Amino acid sequence: MALDDKIKQRWANSRILLLGGSAGSFKLLFKLVKLLPPNLNKTVIIIIHRKKNFFSEIEKLFAENSRMLLREISDKEPVMNNTIYIAPANYHSLVENAGFFSLDVSDAVWYSKPSIDVTFESVAEVYKERVTAVLFSGANQDGAEGLLKLRKKGALTIAQDPEDAEMTEMPQAAIDIHAAEYVLRTTEIFELLEDTN
């Protein structure tokens, strides 16, 4: 589909960009981190499934290739504009009403910690319609319920077209419960998120 003025305006009005993904999403998220302009005027929060207790170079690799300030989420850290945050392994990342992050050590959700659902649901409560959320490729249903909650709060919710995803289950789960207001191919998602007007 062509990107209409409505979706572009809602993206422009967003304060928070949520990006969730699992298997098959790493390359796309890496490419997005490289493309996002330093003057995006939004907070970007990335939740990508990580292996438990597996040392990861994701933050370092992303930070070296980002034009925005990029950091791993720390407990009680304020949510800053023009910053990309990555959810750390072995914790759930939430946003509190006062505009601070909190890290939670409760059980995994959909076998995942960080859970996309947990972050999406907490952001929905705080930022409501001022959010754009994108759910990418993945091999389980994490993120679908969180995306639905965001949509009910007025957020702009997008699922990667399953036909365009390496692993279809995650975006398809969101589509099946009508959590995604838009289903876009990867090229359309990139076109939208690169638009800073």
Image (tube, rainbow, N blue to C red):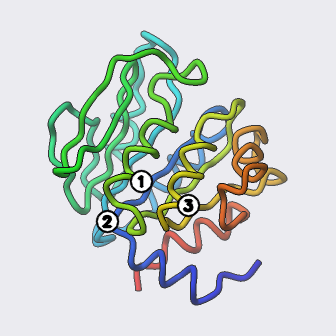
Give the labeled residue for mark 2.
42
Determine the residue located farthest toward the right in the rendered image.
163
Q: Residues within 10 Å of mark 2 (few under 14, many from 20)?
A: some
Image quarter of residue 15:
bottom left
Give the labeled residue for mark 3.
151
Residue pictured at 54% horizontal, 60% vertical: 152
Residue 17, image x, y percentages: 42, 59
Residue pictured at 29% horizontal, 66% vertical: 38
Q: Nearer the viewer, residue 55 or 120?
A: 120
Proximity of marks 3 and 1: CB atoms separated by less than 8 Å: no
Q: Is residue 115 above or below residue 83?
A: above
Distance between the Cα atoms at labels 3 and 2?
Answer: 19 Å
- Answer left or right for 121 relative to 146: left
- Answer left or right for 180 relative to 101: right
Residue 109, image x, y percentages: 54, 23
First of labels 3, 1 by sequence position: 1
Q: Nearer the viewer, residue 135 or 102?
A: 102
Q: Is residue 4 above or below residue 151?
A: below
- Disc 2 on helix, strand or loop? loop
Residue pictured at 29% horizontal, 58% vertical: 68
Distance between the Cα atoms at labels 3 and 1?
Answer: 8 Å
Residue 173, image x, y percentages: 74, 43
> Residue 124, labelled with which disc?
1
Image quarter of residue 114:
top left
Distance between the Cα atoms at labels 1 and 2?
Answer: 16 Å
Residue pictured at 19% horizontal, 55% vertical: 80
First of labels 3, 2 by sequence position: 2
Which quadrant: the C terminus?
A: bottom left
Give the amino acid at mark 3: Arg
Give the amino acid at mark 2: Lys
Q: Is residue 162 above or below residue 41?
A: above
